Every structure is written in structure tokens, then in C-alpha cells.
Image (cartoon, rainbow, N blue to C red):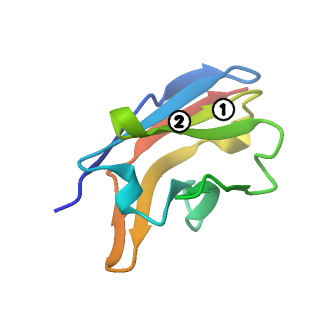
């Protein structure tokens, strides 16, 4: 059973930074893609950023220029560096991993940005 464990969420002031981490229970190269989604209160879950097995990255328009996704295969970790945070970035952030056999999700980590 694949496990994804997020960490790094918290409360930060507008303009601040946070780095989210996701640790996988197996090598991240077992997945075609990994990344981050978020879900704000009363909103649908939306993609934030993703990275493919080949290293290609993709960002939602809301995070371009502010968020950076990266990975450390030796540590089985994927990161989301978030800078210049805004109150509208407040959400639960979920790590996900996808491969042919299915999709896997972490339990989520809360990010709250105060104005």
C-alpha cells in the first residue's frame, strides 16, 4: 500500500513563505507523476503543481512565479516551495502520486495565510 505523508503546513502572514514536503513509502520513480493539489473551504480540489518522472513541471496559473515544485529521489520526497503567499492560498494541500495502477493521496496539510 502506497503511503504519502505531508508536512510543513502552518500559519503564515501574507507575503511569507512555506515549504511543504511529501514523503513516499517507495521510490518516487515508481510513479509517472507526483504533485500537489489544494482544497479551500467550500471549494473544489485544484491542481497546484506537478512533476513527471522525467522532471517536467506544471503549475496552475495561481502559483506561477511564486511556487516551485522539486524532488529528492534519494529521500523519496517531493517539495512545494511557496513564496509570496496570499490569503487566497489558504487551503488543505494534498500530495498525490499517479501511476498506471492508480492514484494515491496523502492526508493533507493545512496552510493558512493571514492578511
Foreground pick, 2 / 111: 2
Q: Quadrant of residue 16?
A: top right
What residue is disc 1 on? 82
Q: Vertical placement of 15 versus 104: above or below?
A: above
Q: Dot 2 surroundings within 10 Å: few (below 14), some, or many (20 or more)?
A: many
The residue under the point 61% across, 63% down is 46
Q: Quadrant of residue 6?
A: top left
Residues at circles 2 and 1 in contact by the CB criterion of under 8 Å: yes
Q: Position of residue 68 (x, y in %)?
A: 68, 38
Q: Quadrant of residue 103?
A: bottom left
Foreground pick, 24 / 92: 24
Q: Dot 1 surroundings within 10 Å: few (below 14), some, or many (20 or more)?
A: many
- Distance from the alpha carbon under mark 2 to that under mark 1: 10 Å
Which of marks 1 and 2 precedes in the sequence?
1
Secondary structure state at the residue bearing disc 2: strand
Q: Which quadrant, please, contains the N terminus?
A: bottom left
The residue under the point 55% across, 46% down is 91
What residue is disc 2 on? 111
Q: Position of residue 75 (x, y in %)?
A: 35, 33
Q: Position of residue 43 (x, y in %)?
A: 60, 64
Residue with the most extreme bottom position: 101
Q: Position of residue 67 (x, y in %)?
A: 71, 38
Q: Vertical placement of 100 versus 92: above or below?
A: below
Q: Vertical placement of 12 versus 94: above or below?
A: above
Q: Nearer the viewer, mark 2 or mark 1?
A: 1
The tag on residue 7 is: none
Amino acid at each position: 500500500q502506497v503511503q504519502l505523508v505531508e508536512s510543513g503546513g502552518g500559519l503564515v502572514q501574507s507575503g511569507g513563505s512555506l515549504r511543504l514536503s511529501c514523503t513516499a513509502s517507495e521510490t518516487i520513480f515508481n510513479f509517472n507523476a507526483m504533485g500537489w493539489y489544494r482544497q479551500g473551504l467550500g471549494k473544489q480540489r485544484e491542481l497546484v503543481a506537478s512533476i513527471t518522472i522525467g522532471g517536467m513541471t506544471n503549475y496552475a496559473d495561481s502559483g506561477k512565479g511564486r511556487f516551485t515544485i522539486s524532488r529528492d529521489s534519494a529521500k523519496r520526497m517531493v517539495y512545494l516551495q511557496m513564496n509570496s503567499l496570499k490569503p487566497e492560498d489558504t487551503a488543505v494541500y494534498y500530495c498525490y502520486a499517479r501511476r498506471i495502477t492508480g492514484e494515491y493521496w496523502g492526508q493533507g496539510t493545512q496552510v493558512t495565510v493571514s492578511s
